[in-house]
Image: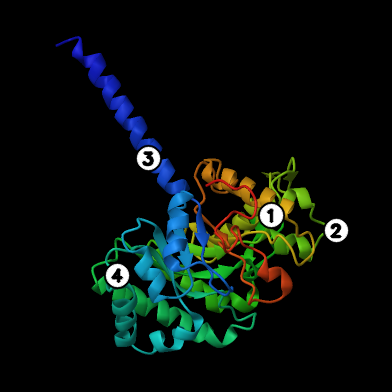
Amino acid sequence: MAGAEPQFKATMLLLGLLLVATLDFTGAQTGVCYGRLGSNLPSPADVVALCNQRNIKRMRIYDPHQPTLQALGGSNIEVILGVPNTDLQNVAASQANANNWVQINVRKYPNVKFRYIAVGNEVSPLTGTAQYTNFLLPAIRNIFNAVSAAGLRNQIKVSTAIETGLVANGYPPSAGTFQPQAQNFIKPIVQFLAGNGAPLLVNVYPYFSYTGNPKSIALEYALFTSSGITTPDGVKYQNLFDALVDATYSALEKAGGSSVQIVVSETGWPSAGGQATSIDNARTYNNNLIKHVNGNSGTPKRPGRAIETYIFDLFDEDQKSPEYEKHFGLFLPNRQPKYPISF
């Protein structure tokens, strides 16, 4: 049997490598955001078929749209399901209301692979969503309790999606902290996520950072085509995306959330309608993004891991405004890609 030992070791090594490859692949899947504020969009069934055809394994939807949930059943696409801001007051009002929301929109679809529930999107005391701030944490708690009571706590993480405007002092990224006016709002949410092992969903847009400050930020740095910069604290950043993510990690650490992971729940680049918008820039950004987040480089603050990321948007949404908001789509309504892109 002595000769079998090397063969056994080789087999175990191969199995180990396969397991690692599988784990990396699962962690590195880039998803898409499926907004529906567009005309002539394909049916949800056709959208799911498109995602399967294009090897898109994860999807974010912004509300419990029943035809979409029905189409996702049995598809093996992992889903971020949104609790719309307009539902927050009702869900926060009582545990029974939250239980009912989870019953109707989650438990009714046992064949859908729910990954996260995003309770609210970009709720902030600093923007036009300030009216929802008092409801957000109670709504998160109640949805979490409802998911736990349904026996799904190990399958579905409950979180919320924020935008990076909540972060101040983002340069250098190590100086990132939550805005003073937002501290009392965001800290209890961060601590709730930390206590329950849930990530924070963050909408990260180098496009808006660049167009807000084009004199100080190079377009190449925003499009992943720069040689990078070295920040005043000596850390080298290859791209603006990593800098924005790490500034948010710094803010999380200062708010008691050192253990909280970031999932990039939206990012993208419009192909028309505004400053620095073109098919070429959108193609460059999104293809470079996929390569970057699927690799194991991570960010300088969190190296060596893929960054779970969802690209906005699957289709153009021509019912949105301003004009550039209509042009984030990866695919045309006929399901052809707007430009070559590979998942």
Give the residue furthest to the right. Answer: 215
Name the residue tied to disc 2: 215
- Judged from the image, the secondary structure of the residue bearing numbered disc 1 is helix
Q: CA distance from mark 3 to mark 1?
A: 30 Å
Residue 196 visible? The answer is no
Q: CA distance from mark 4 to mark 2?
A: 49 Å
For the residue marked with disc 2, what is the amino acid? Lys
Mark 4, Cα crowd under 10 Å, few <14 / some 14-19 / many 20+, is: some
Disc 3 to disc 1: CB gap under 8 Å = no
Disc 1 to disc 4: CB gap under 8 Å = no
Q: Nearer the viewer, residue 72 or 39?
A: 39
Q: CA distance from mark 1 to mark 2?
A: 20 Å
Disc 2 to disc 3: CB gap under 8 Å = no
Q: Earlier in the sequence, mark 2 or mark 3?
A: 3
**Where residue 22 is drawn, which disc sits there?**
3
In the displayed structure, would residue 193 be above or below residue 63? Answer: above
Name the residue tied to disc 4: 109
Tell us which disc is closer to us: 3 or 1. 1
Q: CA distance from mark 2 to mark 3?
A: 43 Å
Residue 34 visible? The answer is yes
- Judged from the image, the secondary structure of the residue bearing numbered disc 3 is helix
Residue at the (43%, 48%) spot, across then down = 27
Give the residue furthest to the left. Answer: 1
For the residue marked with disc 1, what is the amino acid? Ala
Q: Earlier in the sequence, mark 4 or mark 3?
A: 3
Q: Give the percent coordinates (x, y) of residue 258.
A: 49, 58
Q: Earlier in the sequence, mark 3 or mark 1?
A: 3
Q: CA distance from mark 4 to mark 3?
A: 27 Å
Q: Quadrant of residue 88?
A: bottom left
Tell us which disc is closer to us: 2 or 3. 3
Name the residue tied to disc 1: 282
- Judged from the image, the secondary structure of the residue bearing numbered disc 4 is loop
